[in-house]
Amino acid sequence: MWISNTKGQNLSSSLQRILEKNYPEKIGPGAVIYVFDGQELFTANTGLASLISKEKIGSHTSFRMASVSKQFTAYAIYQLANNKKLNLNQRIDYYFPTLNKTVGAITVKQLLNHSSGIADYEGLMGDKWTVQLTDADVLKIVEPANETYFPIGSKFRYSNTAYCLLALIVEKVTKQSYPSYMQKHVFDPLGMKNSLIMSKERVPTARAFGYHPEKGQFIFADQSLTSGTMGDGGVYTTASDYAIWLGYLSKLLSNPTTKESYFGNGNRFPVNQNVDYSFGWFTGKDKNGEDILFHSGESTGFHNIVVFYPSKRKSVSMFSNRDDLKIAGVFDEVMEILDIEIKGLEKEKLFHWLGKVYANTL
């Protein structure tokens, strides 16, 4: 079994000890861990959601998901494709006619699986931006680009730009704002009552604020110029709501047809010889040959990571409101307790490996 009866009886206390060992500052920002073994839920949490209000972190605390958000953006695209409202093989200049011809030839699917080669908007911002970017701003930034990093569809290169454009595609197809669509067609139907896309109109309750450790203290670091984009990282959710999402996704992917439409060879793109990317998830095999999905999120003030067995409805997720790298060691300790190893990534902390993918330094 994934979790033996003996480990299961003590798992919550073991998780708590790991957290308290690595995050001893009880009056500082912290983290929450959720483990579901297919039948039972095991949780642990430590630290404060806000250093001002002193509210403690718990399963009800809403965290910024950063790049863990991409799986939600991808699901919105999946819904629209499944309802025949868009074609994954459609060129994106159909939606964005102002794009250069070369860039416009990218398809929706290539945005989804990071094989587009589209320019990173972060590298093109320069120093003229003084207010937070929107997804529409990202489109404006990349409109002048007349080439891609490589021939379209030939390589993998992680791209936040791609998922900002996907959110704009959702808006163009549905004639709704991206936050409204996600609320009406994803969060509300699933009963994710404490989940939303952060915007001027929608702010989460019981919110964790982000912090950065510096010289022995924690500096408020909740937002940056790129924290206002939505498609690549705008979801706020709680550990308990996220468990609802994974439960739904597990049920969805139990259907062979749906699983193929999500992770079939036509949609997956190889990251390396062991790991692929599709619909907002890294996909691979564990040491026993079982399918395993994973992703992390890194942004100002927040670090998150999740590992998920869709066929077993087993998962482990960790959300934190501090942007140091302690999460890498903590999550590896948890994976060791749960006896999880991802084929090809055994010699490196998963969070660090994912960070290299995002930075395109593998």
Image: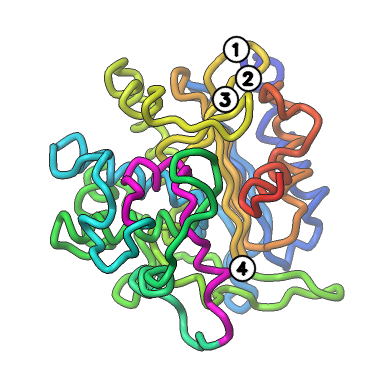
The colour scheme of the drawn protein is rainbow
* Picture layout, residue 158 above or below residue 7: below
Label 3, on which residue?
284
Residue kind at label 3, given as amino acid type = Gly
Label 4, on which residue?
300
Quick one: label 4 or label 2, which is nearer the N terminus? 2
* Residue 206 lies in the magenta-colored region: no
> In which image quadrant can residue 102 be found?
bottom left
Apparent side of residue 199 relative to residue 292 in the rendered image (left or right): left
CA–CA distance in space, label 4 to label 2: 31 Å
Residue 314 percent across, percent down from the top left: 51, 25
Residue kind at label 4, given as amino acid type = Thr
CA–CA distance in space, label 2 to label 3: 7 Å
Label 1, on which residue?
289
Residue kind at label 1, given as amino acid type = Gly
CA–CA distance in space, label 1 to label 3: 9 Å
Extent of the magenta region: 104-127
Do the residues under discs 4 and 1 have CB atoms within 8 angstroms? no
Residue nearest the viewer, comparing 182 with 257: 257
Apparent side of residue 254 relative to residue 240 in the rendered image (left or right): left
Q: Residue at x 39, y 63 (%)?
A: 230
Q: Is residue 15 visible?
A: yes
